[in-house]
Amino acid sequence: MSELRREILRSIRRAAALQLWHLGAVKVNLDQPFKLTSGNYSPIYLNCRQLISSVAFGDLFAAAVRMICDVENVRFDLIAGGETARIPFAAFLARPFGKPIVYVRKGAKEHGLASLVEGSLPPGGV
């Protein structure tokens, strides 16, 4: 990776860290650590749901992902987000990448079409 790309990625990381802090997504509590989904405890918690309201963060996130995909030569035809918190992040990427978006449920619905994936998959699936 070129030195210019390294510096761009460092700048994006710094900008993302500042945005996370500014938006109140980073929580620190040394006295009462946060219980994580894994069951472990941590004095630091990152509330990604706090980020979905920020247009600036969405743009920064998309720029960072584009840079990483360019550097790593990653190509894709579709963007998928898991319900529910990951859907906005998939949406942040869909427009600037010009790709369709779907979302994946934790389990198939028990009514209607019993869909596990919502949106249009390409012929033959993924």
Image: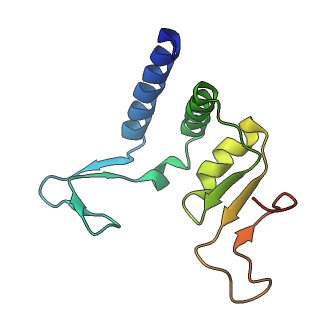
Above or below for 97 versus 126: above
Residue 33 shown left or right of residue 55 in the figure: left
Q: How many numbered circles does the render carry?
A: 0
Pick whichever, 65 or 57, lies toward us. 65
Residue at point 47%, 10% (across, down): 3
- When asked about the image quadrant of residue 62, the answer is top right
Eyeballing the image, is 80 above or below 18? below
Q: Residue furthest right?
A: 123
Residue 22 versus residue 40 in the image, above or below: above
Point out residue 83 in the picture as x, y percentages from the top left corner: 59, 66
Residue lying at the far left in this picture: please name it: 31
| Position in image of residue 47 (x %, y %) | 40, 53
Residue at the limit of the structure toward the front, as seen here: 124
**Residue beneath the point at 55% across and 50% down:** 52
Residue toward you, 50 or 17: 17
In this view, the residue farthest toward the bottom is 111
Residue lying at 68% horizontally and 49% vertically, measured from the top left? 91
| Quarter of the figure with the C terminus | bottom right
| x, y percent for residue 57 | 54, 37
For residue 41, side relative to residue 124 (left or right): left
Q: Is residue 96 above or below residue 104?
A: above
Where's residue 26, x and y in %?
34, 46
Which image quadrant is residue 66 in? top right
Q: Name the colouring of the figure.
A: rainbow
Left or right side of 118 for 83: left
The quadrant where residue 35 appears: bottom left
